[in-house]
Image (cartoon, rainbow, N blue to C red):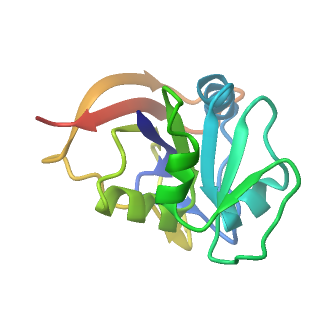
Amino acid sequence: MITLIAAIAKNNALGKDNDLIWHLPADLKRFKKVTTGHFILMGRNTFESIGKPLPKRTTVIITRNNDYFKDGCLVTNSIEDAIALAKDEEEVFLIGGAQIYKQAMIDGLVDKLDITHVHKEFEADVFFPVIDTSIWKEVSREDFKADEKNKYDYSFVSYVKGY
């Protein structure tokens, strides 16, 4: 199963200046719990914004640069090649960025969307593709109110392709 995992704002904002716009500890904790032990596939910019391979995960970087190398990571030139590296895995996570999300959704490479909806609009320079509800069906949702640790209301929502 190929799962796309992202946190997106009400206006589909993902980030600005190659960084996250908000800080939601609950989302980061969930991301770690869900992705630990799995392959995580990401574009080069996303990797560089993180800065290092994430512990207890196999990091695969997708880049057009044939000479790109990062110690402790696998590097490929396409989403398809990245997926092929993880072909024996039960679940693989696409973790960004915007170009990777868009291409994977357009090309029909994704089985599930695991989205944290942040219930606020933000100024951004990269955006998540619109989730087409004629294709994607919501199958689970957990709603949370802002608290002392998480500044914004948010929801954890899973979507699968509708049949």
Residue at the image position 73 percent from the left and 58 percent from the top? 47
Picture quadrant of residue 162:
top left
Q: Is residue 121 left or right of residue 148?
A: left
Residue at the image position 88 percent from the left and 54 percent from the top? 71
State the image coordinates of residue 139 (x, y, percent, origin top left). 27, 25
As rendered, which of 72 and 162 lies closer to the eye? 72
The number of discs equals: 0
Q: Is residue 103 left or right of residue 58?
A: left
Residue at the image position 29 percent from the left and 54 percent from the top? 108
State the image coordinates of residue 9 (x, y, percent, origin top left). 47, 52
As rendered, which of 94 and 19 lies closer to the eye? 94
Q: Which residue lies most toward the right here?
A: 71
Q: Is residue 20 above or below residue 85?
A: below
As rendered, which of 23 and 147 lies closer to the eye? 23
Picture quadrant of residue 58:
top right
Q: Is residue 4 above or below residue 57?
A: below
State the image coordinates of residue 147 (x, y, percent, origin top left). 63, 26
Picture quadrant of residue 112:
top left
